[in-house]
Image (cartoon, rainbow, N blue to C red):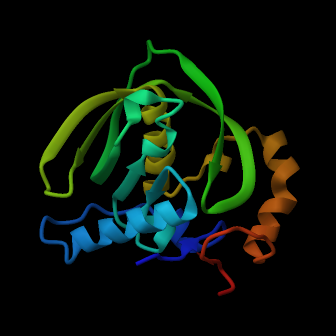
Amino acid sequence: MILPIYTYGHPVLRKVAQDIPADYPDLKALVSDMFETLTASEGVGLAAPQIGKAIRVVVIDLDVLSEEFPEYKDFRKAYVNAHIVEVDENAKKETMEEGCLSIPGIHEVVTRPTRIRVVYRDEDFREHDEWVEGYLARVMQHEFDHLEGNMFVDRLSPLRKQLIKNKLKSIIQGRFRCGYRTKNVRK
């Protein structure tokens, strides 16, 4: 089922998401719905707060980028109870443009570390602890930020934030267009 994506200004996007127990009801159905929603919105990552649930579940589908990044062919994973536990301080930082399904129409340049250590559980609740680097590390940081109640616009300089203030206000007011279902503060 395709779910609406909650947009900037909705309070659930600012909550710190909670870990879930192994017996969380219908986890596999939730993950399936999140992947379906992600595909329909043409994104690469989606965090549960973006569909109105303040729980630590993220789905990432990088297969859509496999022409540019062949290493991501068939890459489609769910991350449950995901946490970044370490940042490689010796790794370089990379600056790239980012966008967000919850902030339609806004793309800004964000600097992030290129290598991080994450712990999470997969859909079958098996535990993982791994170092991740490159583009996947960027996507994970972006999506895991949502689990902490943060968004990529929080990482912008005060000047850049000021320059996009009216666009963000328009999103809060529901004055935007995008090609997927959304839910904003006013709905």
- Residue 61 appears left or right of 95: left
- Residue 25 appears left or right of 90: left
Q: Please give the count of numbered marks on the rendered protein.
A: 0
Visible residue check, residue 62: no
Q: Could you tell me residue 88's position as x and y percent?
A: 40, 20
Q: Is residue 102 above or below residue 142?
A: below
Q: Could you tell me residue 11's position as x and y percent?
A: 57, 73
At 76% from the left and 70% from the top, the residue drawn is: 177
Q: Could you tell me residue 21's position as x and y percent?
A: 17, 66
Q: Name the outermost residue toward the top.
A: 90
Report the quarter where the N terminus lies: bottom left
Q: Is residue 137 above or below residue 22?
A: above
Q: Name the outermost residue toward the bottom.
A: 187
Q: Could you tell me residue 133's position as x and y percent?
A: 40, 25
* Quadrant hosting residue 117: top left
Q: In front: 4, or 166?
A: 4
- Residue 159 appears left or right of 129: right
Q: In front: 18, or 120?
A: 120
Visible residue check, residue 76: yes
- Residue 21 appears left or right of 31: left
* Quadrant hosting residue 85: top left
Report the quarter where the C terminus lies: bottom right
At 81% from the left and 75% from the top, the residue drawn is: 175
